Image (cartoon, rainbow, N blue to C red):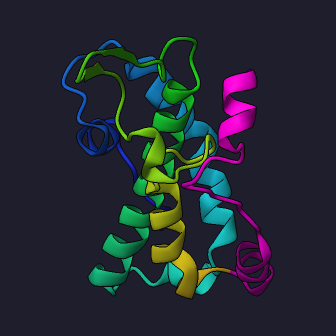
């Protein structure tokens, strides 16, 4: 049995209620689901009698795909801009201090891969374990450099 992730599942994860993104979501599912399925040990995919395992695998795959959809939307021009007026700010979530990366701004992909980790092929697990990601919640520039720029 193959993994099963539907458009509706992704829309729920991303809190989307309109049909504007249906074709993009379908394309992303078609692109990502085989890759995720390939990374999982076949014995877990084939264990159709274990309903809980199948639900876990489907949920992990859905989180990875939803995270990728949100990351792509976050990278669109104007999607991550903010406007500040006095003490009122208009902008995106998460705020810049959230510590997110542009590849996974909401941490949903990471959450999905962590959920799938016990069921992944050994080479995939080792790759995810050595994948480095540098996140910083503090400015890399000191006050003098900030005023200069």
Pick the front one: 128 or 41: 128
Above or below, comparing residue 56 to residue 109 in the picture: below
Above or below, comparing residue 128 to residue 89 in the picture: below
**Magenta residues, as a range?**
121-149
Above or below, comparing residue 101 to residue 118 in the picture: above
Q: Can you give x and y, in whole percent of width and height, for residue 137 in the image? A: 54, 55
Residue beneath the point at 61% across and 56% down: 136
- Which quarter of the rendering shows the C terminus? top right
Quarter-wise, where is residue 77 in the image? Answer: top right
Residue beneath the point at 58% across and 86% down: 43
Left or right side of 62 for 30: right
Pick the front one: 132 or 45: 132
Q: Can you give x and y, in whole percent of width and height, for residue 45 in the image? A: 52, 75
Left or right side of 45 for 136: right
Q: For the image shown, how many numbered marks are present on the structure?
A: 0
Pick the front one: 89 or 10: 89
Q: Can you give x and y, in whole percent of width and height, for residue 2 in the image? A: 50, 62
Seen as rendered, the residue at the extreme left is: 17
Residue 134 highlighted magenta (yes or no): yes
Residue beneath the point at 45% across and 29% down: 25
Residue 70 highlighted magenta (yes or no): no
Q: Can you give x and y, in whole percent of width and height, for residue 131 in the image? A: 76, 69
Residue beneath the point at 53% across and 50% down: 100
Left or right side of 110 for 53: left
Seen as rendered, the residue at the extreme front is: 144
Residue 106 appears in the rendering: no
Residue 3 appears in the rendering: yes
């Amino acid at each position: 049995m193959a993994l099963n992730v539907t458009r509706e599942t992704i829309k729920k994860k991303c809190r989307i209620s309109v049909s504007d993104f249906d074709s993009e979501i379908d394309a992303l599912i078609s692109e990502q689901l085989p890759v995720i399925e390939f990374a999982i040990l076949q014995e877990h995919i084939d264990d159709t009698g274990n309903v809980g395992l199948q639900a876990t695998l489907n949920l992990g795959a859905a989180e990875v795909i939803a995270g990728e959809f949100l990351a792509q939307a976050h990278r669109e021009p104007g999607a991550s801009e903010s406007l500040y007026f006095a003490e009122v700010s208009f902008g995106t979530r998460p705020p810049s201090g959230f510590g997110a990366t542009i590849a996974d701004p909401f941490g949903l992909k990471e959450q999905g891969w962590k959920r799938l980790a016990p069921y992944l092929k050994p080479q995939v697990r080792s790759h995810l374990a050595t994948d480095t990601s540098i996140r910083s919640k503090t400015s890399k520039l000191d006050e003098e450099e900030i005023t200069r720029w």
